[in-house]
Image (spheres, grey):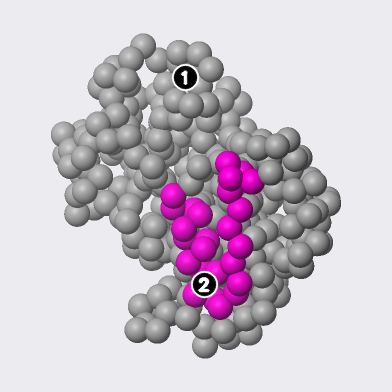
Amino acid sequence: MLKSRHLLGLEGMEGKEIQLYLDTARSFREILDRPIKRVPTLQGKTVLNLFYEPSTRTRISFELAEKRLSSDTINFSASTSSVKKGESLIDTVRNIEAMRIDMVVVRHSSPGAAHLLTQVMEANIVNAGDGGHEHPTQALLDMFTIREKLGSLKGKTIGLIGDISHSRVALSNIYGLIASGARVIVCGPATLIPRYIDRLGVEVYHNVDEVIPQVDVLNILRLQLERQRSKLFPSLREYHNYYGITRERLSRASKPILIMHPGPMNRGIEISSNVADSEHSVILEQVTNGVALRMAVLYLLAGGKSEIH
Ligand code: CP
């Protein structure tokens, strides 16, 4: 049973609720392998995809998930809307809701934007990334992928590498992984790691070569240059030399490590191409699993609890 009719973040979410999302995604993952990948589960529901920031994976993944569930889908893009004429977020959503929509998937550059919508709308709200705050469906699909590959999250060691400070993916992963019994290591330059992050229950490292021998999974994060207001490391070449995940670095590990990246990737900076495309990389499986996970989120928030056919 879900505690909320919205999915705003994984902060405070209990392990059993996370497990419900992941177990439900497992059923939907099987539907994606059928010749006809559509179920009537959300027939009659209308879902608005409200994107104020660019997106490739999340936006297409939600749209596909909605179509696979037979809901009606409306795509809103701020750049081609009356936002350009000065209309506020609240006026925009109130006007769209007046046309009778049931659920909103929102991406916005402001932390708290998804929460704000819960105050002014009746629809179920799903946070598809709010500034540097949370990106709960990305973390859930990351956890789903780890569970599919390694059997469980409990007792596994996950290394989150790179730009932790600006990463909503990192924060949602930390909340979700800790609640699921995993050990979480964060690693990056001190300038890209928030000062008090150890209070969230993670271990902090600055030398990636000390992390590699300890982990089952490396989730490599994009350097978010667009969110960095000042120069936080000397050069991209230096960043790659110290923190870039390369085949040479991984060759020193005693066991294979699952390689993950939420995308979009900066090849040759945080990850080398031969690692991104290696046999241990599950980066494209994350994307496939994302559709199933988002189907599960929409289904559960719409009140679904019975078996899926
Ligand atoms: N991982 C992720 O959020 O990618 P997009 O920005 O392309 O949606």
Residue 15 is left or right of residue 26, and the answer is right
Residue type at mark 2? Lys
Q: Label 2's element?
A: helix
Residue 263 is left or right of residue 242, and the answer is right
Q: Position of residue 182 (x, y in %)?
A: 48, 51
Q: Earlier in the sequence, mark 2 or mark 1?
A: 2
Q: Which residue is mark 2?
A: 67
Q: Quadrant of residue 31?
A: bottom left
- Residue 72, magenta (yes or no): yes
Mark 2–mark 1 distance (CA, rounded to whole Å) = 43 Å
Please name whichever residue, 135 or 96, is drawn nearer the observer in this view of the structure.
96
Q: Is residue 87 visible?
A: yes
Q: Label 1's element?
A: helix
- Identity of the residue furthest to the bottom in this view: 309
Q: Is residue 232 above or below residue 104?
A: above
**Placement of the N terminus among the 4 image quadrants:** bottom right
Q: Quadrant of residue 267?
A: top left
Please name whichever residue, 120 or 276, is drawn nearer the observer in this view of the structure.
120
Q: Position of residue 256 (x, y in %)?
A: 23, 50
- Residue 227, magenta (yes or no): no
Please report the residue visible at 39 percent of the width from the left and 57 percent of the height from the top.
287
Residue 239 is left or right of residue 140, and the answer is left
The stretch in magenta equals 56-81
Q: Which residue is mark 1?
A: 190
Which of the two discs, 2 and 1, sits closer to the camera? 2
